[in-house]
Image (cartoon, rainbow, N blue to C red):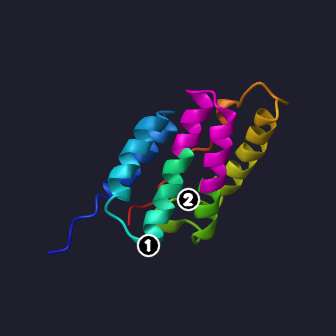
Amino acid sequence: MPREIPWNALGRGAELFNQGLFWEAHEAWEELWLELEDEPKIFVQGLIQVAAAGHKAFAQLQPRGCVKLLRAALEKLSASPPDYLGVETRKFVPALQRMLAEALRWEAGDVDGLQRALMPSIEVMQLP
């Protein structure tokens, strides 16, 4: 019998993420990530890395970790087709690229930190 994929974790994670609860979003998406394989697994891992970057940026104030995680996330999310798994990516990915540019300035010491408004919201248009 095929196992049940907990797709609802995608939406639950997005809600938590959009509330700024990045660690909790990471945990919700990990529940889904553990059940996936191949491209869907890589895409969800990218979302997890964005949440972890948010946690590094806004909870731990660690620019190096934020930059590293955003780069890894963008590599995964950019490789997926637009709006993959029902997650809006046409605006989300470019917004993350802008956040990475500012995070690089933070890491270089040119700015004191990241503005919370730089983190884009995640829109789940429909669950798979």
Q: Indicate whether 59 appears above or below 45.
A: above
What mark, if any, has residue 127 been given in the picture?
none
The residue to which callout 1 is attached is 38
List the residue tagged with mark 2.
88
Q: Position of residue 68 (x, y in %)?
A: 65, 47
Query: Which element carries disc 1, helix, strand or loop?
Result: helix
Instruction: Tell me the SS state at disc 2.
Output: loop
> From what the image shows, is residue 62 above or below residue 51?
above
* Boundaries of the magenta span: 51-72
Q: Is residue 84 magenta?
A: no
Q: Main secondary structure of the magenta part?
A: helix
Residue 58 counted in the magenta span: yes
Q: Quadrant of residue 104?
A: top right
Mark 2, other Cα within 10 Å: few <14 / some 14–19 / many ≥20? some
Residue type pointed to by label 1? Asp
Q: Nearer the viewer, mark 2 or mark 1?
A: 1
Residue at the bottom extreme?
A: 1
User: What residue is drawn where x is 69% and y is 49%?
Assistant: 95
Q: Percent from the top left, x then y, of residue 53? A: 58, 41
116 vs 2: above or below: above
* Label 1: few (<14), some (14–19) or many (≥20) C-alpha neighbours in 10 Å: few
Where residue 50 appears, as percent x and y from the top left, is 56, 47
Sequence-first disc among 2 and 1 = 1
Quadrant (top left, top right, bottom left, bottom right) of the N terminus:
bottom left
Identity of the residue furthest to the right in this view: 110
